[in-house]
């Protein structure tokens, strides 16, 4: 039995934790997660939608706290998200 780990080729540089750039990446990841949650929400009913809404609220709080902690403006976050989206290959953008 092989114990090889599945690794993905890294296209972006490693970001040091606790930095402004890490906070910007967190905001981008939250935006991506919210987009995926919206897509999933279309296909579920009842209590599941409510639970997805609760997760979305938590993700928004995480993004707002990261933005507040590092005094990141909305314009700066949007510009970073666009730059990061262009840096990623097409295969990783759509799950």
Image: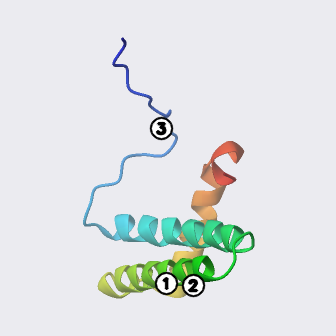
Label 3 or label 2, whichever comes before in sequence order: 3
Q: Is residue 86 left or right of residue 26?
A: right
C-alpha distance separating marks 3 and 2: 35 Å
Q: Residues within 10 Å of mark 3 (few under 14, many from 20)?
A: few
Rendering coords of residue 40 (x, y %)? 67, 67
- Most foreground residue, 49 or 29: 49
Q: Residues within 10 Å of mark 1 (few under 14, many from 20)?
A: few
Q: Secondary structure at mark 1?
A: helix
* In this rendering, the label closer to the viewer, 3 or 2: 2
Are the residues flagged by discs 2 and 1 in contact, CB closer than 8 Å?
Answer: yes
Are the residues flagged by discs 3 and 2 in contact, CB closer than 8 Å?
Answer: no
Query: Residue at (30%, 84%) from the top-left corner?
Result: 69
C-alpha distance separating marks 2 and 1: 6 Å
> Is residue 24 shown above or below 16?
below
| Quarter that holds the N terminus | top left
Q: Quadrant of residue 22?
A: bottom left
C-alpha distance separating marks 1 and 3: 32 Å
Q: Which residue is mark 2?
A: 50
Query: Residue at (56%, 77%) from the top-left corner?
Result: 52
Rendering coords of residue 48 (x, y %)? 59, 76
Q: Secondary structure at mark 3?
A: loop
Rendering coords of residue 6 (x, y %)? 44, 29
* In this rendering, the label closer to the viewer, 2 or 1: 2
Query: Residue at (52%, 79%) from the top-left corner?
Result: 51
> Is residue 45 shown above or below 22?
below
Q: Is residue 88 left or right of residue 71?
A: right
Q: Which residue is mark 1?
A: 54
Q: Tell me, for residue 86, which label it has, or none.
A: none
What colour scheme was applied to this rendering of the protein? rainbow
Q: Tell me, for residue 10, which label it has, or none.
A: 3
């Amino acid at each position: 039995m092989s114990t090889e780990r599945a690794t993905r080729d890294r296209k972006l540089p490693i970001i040091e934790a606790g930095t402004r750039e890490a906070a910007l990446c967190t905001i981008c990841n939250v935006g991506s997660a919210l987009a995926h949650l919206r897509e999933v929400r279309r296909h579920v009913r009842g209590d599941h939608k409510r639970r997805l809404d609760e997760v979305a609220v938590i993700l928004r709080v995480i993004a707002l706290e990261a933005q507040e902690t590092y005094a990141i403006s909305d314009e700066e976050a949007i510009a970073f998200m666009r730059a990061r989206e262009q840096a990623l290959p097409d295969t990783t953008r759509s799950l």
